[in-house]
């Protein structure tokens, strides 16, 4: 294992000649790169960072005056990790963006092999239609667009609507499994309202005739009201974890597995005064603040967060969370993929 930590030195002229000779046939010596491809622990280019809502919101509205949702197809400001600029991603494996839909606008119907989550940050009354079912979205709601399902978004309310988009874009790109198709017209014909989706799958029951067609949850709307109630009850009567307070993971109600096969999604409550123990895990995690104020201590930095801020904790970097008031955090990561491949690790630090 000593070679893994050895410093890279300039090869001798004989070796360089040899490397040049074999390079012409697309061959390269492993020993020159071994130390950088097999590291003792994760060596991510992803860095901690926080995007302030106070800065993002005016820029979103400015984008709203520069381009229509129809022209843009999706009017989104991508949150790019400072260590991964130009790569359209917030972590090595996941994408994040803030999407704006102005009153009266429609983001036209399309489908793609990438799975998407929507986490609503501002506005009420806009809708997402997924495979002919419509859901009206409110702040704090978590909405799923499963892989290869037609979806369009529209805002029939009188106010701008903003949500956080989370996609598995880099994972699908890594696997070269991208497909995309535009739908007919601007919006889908919708039949069922989302309240029936919640009635069918949101009560620890399912329709007797239901047969799963994918691993993604058939429940695609998780209203904040229900999640918040659950966390409040846990705050009053539940036992708290020393690192993350009260934390729930969104599930596929039929299988009990992750709600999305490639993206793990969570919601947690840190009571006022909470000061969490240090923690790290191999899944870089994107946090979106729903309520409250607090801070994340990571890699010698203090990320002070407030409502609607988004911050990122990269793979294997120890961090701790603190709350000045009751704080609710939504988060997502690639944990389902890592666990499926026996790669996921965590540690209290
Ligand atoms: Fe889409």
Image (cartoon, rainbow, N blue to C red):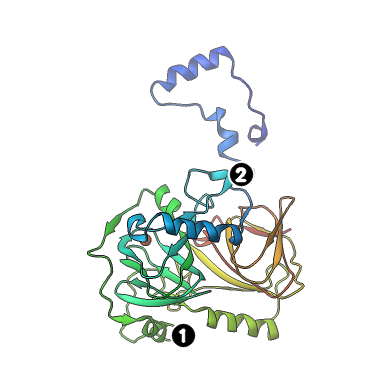
Question: What's the CA distance linking mark 1 and mark 2?
Answer: 41 Å
Q: Nearer the viewer, residue 22 or 323?
A: 323
Q: Is mark 2 within 8 Å of ligand 1?
A: no
Q: Position of residue 323 (x, y in %)?
A: 72, 69
Residue at mark 2: 43
Ligand 1 is found in the corner quadrant, namely bottom left
Can residue 255 be seen in the rendering of this structure?
no
- In the image: residue 275, left or right of residue 186: right
Residue 204: numbered disc: 1
315 in relation to 84, above or below: below
Residue 153: numbered disc: none
Q: What residue lies at 59% left-to-right and 84% top-to-bottom? A: 229
- In the image: residue 48, left or right of residue 102: right
Q: What residue lies at 56% left-to-right and 69% top-to-bottom? A: 266
Q: Position of residue 240 (x, y in %)?
A: 71, 76
Find numbered disc 2 in the image and state the secondary structure of the residue it sits on.
loop
Quadrant occupied by the N terminus: top right
Q: Nearer the viewer, residue 138 or 300?
A: 138
Q: Earlier in the sequence, mark 1 or mark 2?
A: 2
């Amino acid at each position: 294992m000593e070679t893994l930590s050895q410093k890279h030195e300039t090869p001798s002229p004989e070796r360089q000649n040899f490397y040049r000779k074999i390079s012409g046939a697309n061959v390269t010596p492993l020993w020159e790169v071994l130390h950088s491809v097999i590291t003792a622990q994760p060596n991510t280019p992803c860095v901690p960072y926080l995007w302030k809502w106070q800065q993002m919101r005016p820029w979103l509205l400015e984008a709203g005056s520069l381009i229509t949702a129809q022209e843009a197809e999706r009017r989104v400001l991508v949150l790019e990790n400072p260590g991964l600029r130009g790569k359209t991603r917030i972590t090595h494996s996941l994408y994040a963006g803030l999407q704006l839909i102005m009153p009266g606008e429609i983001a036209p119907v399309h489908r793609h092999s990438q799975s998407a989550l929507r986490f609503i940050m501002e506005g009420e009354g806009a809708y997402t239609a997924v495979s002919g079912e419509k859901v009206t979205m409110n702040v704090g709601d978590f909405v799923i667009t499963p892989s290869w399902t037609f979806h369009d978004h529209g805002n029939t309310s009188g106010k701008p609507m903003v949500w956080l988009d989370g996609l598995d874009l880099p994972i699908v790109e890594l696997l070269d499994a991208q497909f995309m198709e535009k739908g007919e017209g601007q919006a889908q014909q919708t039949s069922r309202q989302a309240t029936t989706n919640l009635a069918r799958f949101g009560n620890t029951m399912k329709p007797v005739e239901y047969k799963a067609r994918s691993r993604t949850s058939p429940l695609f709307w998780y209203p904040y009201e229900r999640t918040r109630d659950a966390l409040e009850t846990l705050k009053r009567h539940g036992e708290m974890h020393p690192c993350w307070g009260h934390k729930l993971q969104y599930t596929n109600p039929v299988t009990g597995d992750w709600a999305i096969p490639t993206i793990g999604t969570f919601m947690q409550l840190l009571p006022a005064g909470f000061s969490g123990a240090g923690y790290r895990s191999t899944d870089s995690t994107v946090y979106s603040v729903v309520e409250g104020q607090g801070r994340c201590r990571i890699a010698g930095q203090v990320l002070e967060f407030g409502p609607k801020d988004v911050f990122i904790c990269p793979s294997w970097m120890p961090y701790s969370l603190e709350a000045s008031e009751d704080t609710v955090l939504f988060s997502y990561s690639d944990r389902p993929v890592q666990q499926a491949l026996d790669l996921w690790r965590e540690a209290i630090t």
